[in-house]
Image: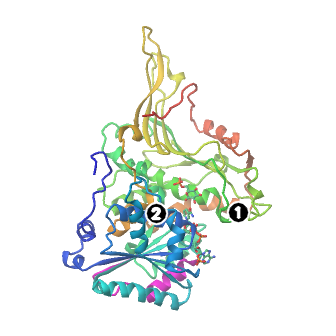
Amino acid sequence: MGSGEWHVEKRSSLKSELSKDIGESESSQECGSLSIIVLGASGDLAKKKTFPALFNLYRQGFLPPSEVHIFGYARSKMTDDDLRDRIRGHLIPRNVTAEISEDVLNFLHLIKYVSGSYDTEDGFHLLDDEISKYECQKNSQEHSKRLFYLALPPSVYPSVCRMIKLCCMNKSDLGWTRIVVEKPFGRDLESAEQLSAQIGELFDESQIYRIDHYLGKELVQNLLVMRFANRLFLPLWNRDNIANVQIVFREDFGTQGRGGYFDQYGIIRDIIQNHLLQVLCLVAMEKPVSIKPEHIRDEKVKVLQAVNLIKDEEVVLGQYEGYKDDPTVPEDSNTPTFATMVLRIHNERWEGVPFILKAGKALNSRKAEIRVQFKDVPGDIFKCNKQGRNEFVIRLQPSEALYMKLTVKQPGLEMSTIQSELDLSYGQRYQGVVIPEAYERLILDTIKGDQQHFVRRDELKAAWEIFTPLLHRIDKGEFKPISYKPGTRGPAEADELLAKAGYVQTHGYIWIPPTL
Ligand SMILES: NC(=O)C1=CN([C@@H]2O[C@H](COP(=O)(O)OP(=O)(O)OC[C@H]3O[C@@H](n4cnc5c(N)ncnc54)[C@H](OP(=O)(O)O)[C@@H]3O)[C@@H](O)[C@H]2O)C=CC1
Ligand SMILES: O=C1O[C@H](COP(=O)(O)O)[C@@H](O)[C@H](O)[C@H]1O
């Protein structure tokens, strides 16, 4: 392995890794085997994200074939080979090498498909038989570890969880059963709480992994390190110095044939209530007592509970022209494909600092970033405040980077100032390093039993509390989206809201990701 490569040394055994991280006894680890069951294996997410993530983990030695088996489960009638053919083309390696096709073959060979319904016992008994057969072969029934990944519409979560509990649990206290559930977890506070209660009756919170793939992104994971391991930021990170914070998600494509799904949810439920709010938590929370998952999640809940209700006058909604041309979208759809809103955190650190969350589809660019804008320098002797404010930007994607926008002396004889940046661009700084996919990381965390990057039940509740009143008004048609042209910045009113909230745009300066 080259020295510049990511931390992916082959694991000789999954057992030692697990015992170290989740504190299981060595003896229980020694006989264990791991079954990963992808429910909804015939679907889009499974094909595009779940199986490719498992493949990457397999290639890096985290899923040794002697200890791991993978099962696909769905209603579609398919053979093992049909499923393998379906996913083969999506197992795109990041570093193409000669042995890759052999890796693909070996990985696909680990996968077994079982067909059955989501609400009757027959299929799940069949699934349990297959898993048990494999565990017997490995002589590890007493220590079986079963990871169920629900790549399914949330409507079937309760029945699927019931069936797992009834038919497919690990057979002794020495192993474990864990459930990974995808967003959207509910449509509003009431439905989310109902879903939580239904699943909570069947599984302990420690068995439930609510995935939000933004928490698996490299630069999102860097937020806590950056904030709490650098003296530089500690004294600055508050209302005395920060004027406003923007958390932005932009896509340069529309709903791409997922209009039917999207229309039931809209941009707030699809992106803002989960991905952007999770990022806000990490930007705004207080320092946790330690990096233990519960300490971190305690702080996330506290900051969410301090968010005020969103004011109508601090929201702009948009819908791109042509959205309703999708035959699966109702002609009178009121669903926003764009939203900008201001969240206000009522606590000592952030009182008065607007957190502007912005997300949109079919815009003029694709990017996700956090932009922390600092206040003007008091007593500006260079008279350079008008050129622009200091900004600290965390570019989540594409071209991952941390950069600080600063005022510096223009090189040359004159004493004049210009805007420039201190730039940590990952592509340049970490050449040859492959940044892991979010799903890859999060599945590995699930195997290790680390819930740090997963959403806890009380966190989810607090998140829905913030958005539910606004969402209900939109659902009732009381709040209308403004039409915008695809390929633009979205409604002009959103930029006006930004300015009203105090964001000062720097003109004549643009950050260009450095090329190698
Ligand atoms: N696709 C994506 O990019 C993303 C998806 N997600 C979430 O992941 C989960 C799965 O998404 P995705 O794979 O796109 O979903 P799909 O619509 O592709 O559904 C997955 C599988 O579930 C079964 N299924 C579909 N509709 C129903 C239904 N009404 N009742 C019972 N079973 C059904 C189908 O399998 P069969 O008929 O064979 O049983 C299907 O292959 C969802 O919660 C989604 O919101 C989250 C982020 C991104
Ligand atoms: O969860 C979702 O995320 C994707 C965007 O994910 P990214 O990792 O590519 O930024 C979005 O397209 C989709 O609508 C949403 O459901």
Residue 164 in magenta?
Answer: yes
Residue at image x 66%, y 41%?
489
How many dots with numbers?
2
On-image quarter of the C terminus: top left
Q: Secondary structure at mark 1?
A: helix
Give the labeled residue for mark 1. 475
Q: CA distance from mark 1 to mark 2?
A: 36 Å
The amino acid pointed to by label 2 is Pro
* Viewer-side residue, 182 vs 194: 182
Please provide percent x and percent y for residue 452. 37, 61
Residue 327 in magenta?
Answer: no
* Viewer-side residue, 65 vs 422: 65
Residue at image x 30%, y 56%?
289
Q: Secondary structure at mark 2?
A: helix
Question: For the residue carrying disc 1, how many other residues have a C-alpha within 10 Å: few (<14), some (14-19), or many (20+)?
Answer: some
Between marks 1 and 2 in the image, the one whose residue lies nearer the viewer: 2
Q: Could you tell me if residue 229 is visible in this image? A: yes
Rendered image: mark on residue 52? 2
Does the CB distance between marks 1 and 2 fall below 8 Å? no
